[in-house]
Amino acid sequence: MSTAISPLAPTNVPDMPRIAGVRLATAAAGIRYKNRTDVLLALLDKGTTVAGVFTKSKCPSAAVDWCRDRLKGGEARALVVNSGNANAFTGKTGKQATKLTADIAAKAIDSKPAKIFLCSTGVIGEPLDATKFDGVLATLAQSAVPDGWNNAARAIMTTDTFPKVATATVKLGKAKVRINGMAKGAGMIAPDMATMLAFIFTDAPLSSAVLQSLLKSGVEDTFNAVTIDGDTSTSDTLLAFATGAAKEKGAPEIKRASDPLLKEFTKAFYGVLADLAEQVARDGEGARKLVEIIIEGAVSKKSARKIAMSIANSPLVKTAIAGEDANWGRVVMAVGKAGEPANRDKLAISFNGIRVATKGARDPSYNEAEVSSLMKQPKIQIKVALGLGKGSDRVLTCDLTKEYVVINGDYRS
Amino acid sequence: MSTAISPLAPTNVPDMPRIAGVRLATAAAGIRYKNRTDVLLALLDKGTTVAGVFTKSKCPSAAVDWCRDRLKGGEARALVVNSGNANAFTGKTGKQATKLTADIAAKAIDSKPAKIFLCSTGVIGEPLDATKFDGVLATLAQSAVPDGWNNAARAIMTTDTFPKVATATVKLGKAKVRINGMAKGAGMIAPDMATMLAFIFTDAPLSSAVLQSLLKSGVEDTFNAVTIDGDTSTSDTLLAFATGAAKEKGAPEIKRASDPLLKEFTKAFYGVLADLAEQVARDGEGARKLVEIIIEGAVSKKSARKIAMSIANSPLVKTAIAGEDANWGRVVMAVGKAGEPANRDKLAISFNGIRVATKGARDPSYNEAEVSSLMKQPKIQIKVALGLGKGSDRVLTCDLTKEYVVINGDYRS
């Protein structure tokens, strides 16, 4: 398996600022990997609110079950993430492992297990030996510091080729507040491993209900609009934590999602989600091209999303892009199979701004050489205009290369 | 692009008998390919009934539109198939091309255009020059003979690596009747080309309504239960023709689908469909393994189908099989993402008869070496028992190999 960094990795990695109320520490606990960190502990000051969205899989991991149940409390004191083992499809043992991990963490930080949030990513079906956290978490609790965001993002990687971080600073009322995020991806499921994980931290004083509302709406056009291979992990988890520490700097407490003071913050929050989501697509397994699908003129946003996903998940469209082939016939096919309203004779399709098809047939002015040259670019935009209504959408994906098959096929568990 | 025959090709190719009332001829009309046949004309005696099922694509080819409109008449005198150009997404020109082809064929056989059925498979979006059929079809009409079924199946191939034929002989009343079939597949869409096509011919005297009913029910567990890559062609077409010539041998005329005399015939008819459908899976682009997905214990047949398709279309499951990896974690993932009722803690999963997971966790008695050795076989059966109800289903697919990506990506239009 290649360990080369994706050619689509961002060239500018932001300097991650501190978030008051958050401290981080990582360790190499030997869960599965050797010579690398595989445990992250994020300590959260008292009063930190929490929100989360999870995989829709009917076979979720034990950690997902654990977090879902704990969200009701609305408060978090720590986040524990391990890579190397997903603790998914592990039956009763898996459930016991989550409880033991939370107990160990709660003891280490003098809190309650119900305020500990857990995420696991790695192999499915192998029991997670939670006793490995014993001692480790206590040490981490002692050594946690406000810096080290890149190291934290690195500790949660599986087959990711680069750590993914994003940050924003924005005014809430008259105070500056911060939003930091990190994510891991690779495939929706990496080789034999599970999970897209993302964590957002802010010092803004938001109630857990406000945070949940932000997450739920923000995820729709960011993480939910990214697909690598159409496969959905048993463990996908996005958690957000708000320490409220910015209150001391005069930031107003926000208790209603409709509060107009939240406007700028919401924009910045969505921006961090979008940034991380794009990085996940840029690090898709074997990816050599970032692909943006834009749908216009659908009968509704929902319909546009279905058509966009049909294109983004089509192996034939994705292999064509890998081959730098502006194969619009396959885009027509993917529109046709989406099952959504579409009128063949009104369709127009563009690749990187060049219209190749219009009114249900090849664009008479279409220049094959010009389009072929554009297809060599690292980012490909496919735009489909349906000419039916006002529904539009945007989805990100990557190409399907031989390397994807090598990573996922030649790899043996 | 490799032209080697799929290692999964059937070793026994049947001797195809004649079907009274059907005559065949092929020609090289130079539609796109050189040095190979690319036009098939099947002449059908007067009184031949016809039925058809088509792609559900919202962007169907001009030939699909043509056939759909002509089905109402219930009668057919000829089938014209060309490979090399799909006449799909060709706008008004495409519609004109179908009319011109039908006119030429009707003239050549002294019939009406409305009784000519057309199928085109090949490149999408390029105008089909129907004038190429002029002269060719008249010559074919003169030279058509009752034999040459393999040649006929070869003329309709695109990236197929072997021609696909199947036959059955069965009693209808006291008379022996015959059913011959041929198909082409490759991908649901082959490289830059479209289409699964299949044609069934019988001398049984069946009304077009009976034939349509047989097709509609027969396709459900045969062609509709096969997937190569989840992509749906703009041109998928399955047509059935019944010449009725067996009447002379004493076969009873069947005018009601519920006629008890039809029982044995129906079984044989389904058998031919199933045989051809399996051959399509065996010739999936780049396929090295035939994969059978069996679902048991789902809440309904419909639910079982959705779960089976979720597994069969998962790139991660398919690449794992290519890598001879009994990666049941990915099967769990695919069950979970299907969106159908499933209880993680009741799931059992087997590979080629060896149970690897039970009650939501790894089977304690599971022997990795034993399963790994079975995964080297050319046919892989994945069985999932959900333990919820009595719904069951079976779907065929193939693995996802580097060759699939090479065929569909490195290939340039």
Image (tube, coloured by chain):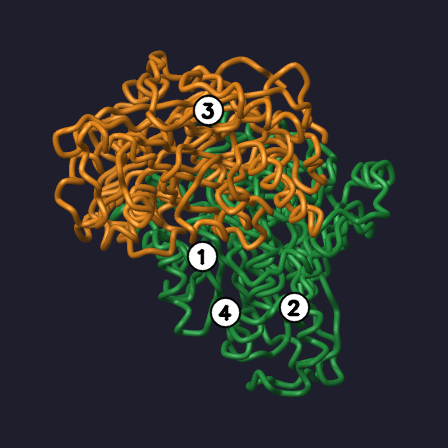
Chain colours: A green, B orange
Task: Categorize mark 3 by other alpha carbons within 10 Å: few (<14), some (14-19), many (20+).
Answer: many
Q: Have a look at marks 4 and 2 and say if they share a chain.
A: yes
Mark 2: amino acid: Leu
Q: Are marks 1 and 2 in contact (CB under 8 Å)?
A: no
The x, y position of residue B248, in whole percent, is 23, 30
- The answer to whether residue A107 is above or below residue B250 is below
The x, y position of residue A107, in whole percent, is 39, 58
Q: Chain of mark 4?
A: A
The circle on residue A51 is 4
Rendered residue at 26%/53% (across/down):
B343
For residue A205, side relative to residue B219 (left or right): right
Rendered residue at 48%/30% (across/down):
B185
Residue denoted by label 3: B283
The circle on residue A159 is none
Mark 3: amino acid: Asp
For residue B397, side relative to residue A287 (left or right): left
Mark 4: amino acid: Ala
Q: Have a look at marks 3 and 4 and say if they share a chain.
A: no
- In the rendered structure, which disc, 1 or 2, sits on the residue that comes first in sequence? 1
Residue denoted by label 2: A388
Q: Secondary structure at mark 3?
A: loop
CA distance separating discs 1 and 4: 14 Å
Q: In front: A226, or A31?
A: A226
